[in-house]
Amino acid sequence: MKLIEGRTIPEVWTKAARYLQDRKGHEDYDLILHITNPVELSSEDSEVIDLVDGFLHTHGGGRIHTVAETIFPISDYVRNGREGVFKIYPERMERIHAYRKDKRWGCYAMRMLRQTDLEGKTFNPLEKIIEKMSAARRYKACYELVSGRPFLEEVASTAEVATYDPATDRNSYYGNLPCLSLASFKYDNTKSQVRLNATYRSHYYMQRTLGNLMGLGRLLYFVAREAGAEVGPLTINSTYATLDTGKAGGGAGNWNRKDISELISNCESIYESADKQLVSG
């Protein structure tokens, strides 16, 4: 188990990538990332995002924004607010899925927006989470949400949504199987913040993780804002983490260890240059 922490998403991703790069086999178990301000981006952070995004695009990988949108559709939220997330996005995804053989494409966000209860009725888990986080500002209440199960009152100010569905995912190993297993929201009464903890069954740190983190940061922002609370920290447990070369996990990218090493060094140089300017200034 290794804990890597920092202020922003790109900063922590860079540290985690370096850690995995230096490990034998470039992998680890229970790699925990803790980001204190997951919605803040400095000019250096933006530069790192652009650098990694350009790398992925050049080498045939998925763009960071595209990966982030599968977790939370920030574009729909910016254009149409809450309705864009709860109504317009799901309707568009239903139309897309009607013409795709892969019905689970983009499933992270949809599994948070559409699930079925024990009576077979469709409900919106994310909307329920916002309701519970908003109520937690006034009452001590806990609601745990898992796939197709009713809310359970157990722990104060907590709501969880599971994105792993054994009915459809049990026979899958790569590609379409959700790597994000659980998202747990907690309201911190001492700081008036919503916190988010996410568990990944496997995490590909080159092709997916930075985009995953950006998407989770946007998801946390949405829940906190709609609940009338502040944005708290984001904590990730990658139960299996690997610094992949693109093909693992069904990825389409193609890069080697030398490419990865150069990318990480360039990201580190951006932060080191900023630190030197602060010292000299």
Image (cartoon, rainbow, N blue to C red):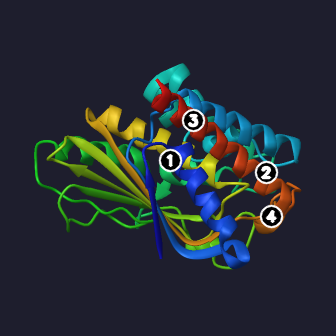
CB under 8 Å between discs 2 and 3: no
Pinpoint residue 212: horizontal percent, then vertical percent: 59, 50
Are there few (<14), some (14-19), or many (20+) residues within 10 Å of tag 4?
few
Residue 258 appears left or right of 224: right
- Under circle 1, the secondary element is helix
Which residue appears farthest toward the top when viewing the image?
79
Q: Nearer the viewer, mark 2 or mark 4?
A: 2
Q: Which residue is mark 4?
A: 250
Say the numbered circle drawn on residue 38: none
The mark lying in front, picked from 3 and 4, is 3
Q: Which residue is mark 2?
A: 262
Q: Amino acid at mark 3?
A: Asp
- Looking at the rendered image, the disc whose residue lies closer to the viewer, 2 or 3, is 2
* x and y percentages locating residue 137 in the rendered image: 16, 42
Mark 2: which secondary structure? helix
Alpha-carbon span between mark 3 and mark 1: 16 Å
Q: Is residue 14 above or below residue 89?
A: below
Task: Name the secondary structure under disc 4.
Answer: helix
Q: Which residue is mark 3?
A: 45
Toward the left, the furthest residue is 139
Crowdedness near tag 2: few (<14), some (14–19) or many (≥20) residues, C-alpha within 10 Å: few
Residue under the point 62% across and 49% down? 210
Left or right of residue 122, residue 150 in this image: left
Q: Which residue is mark 1?
A: 216
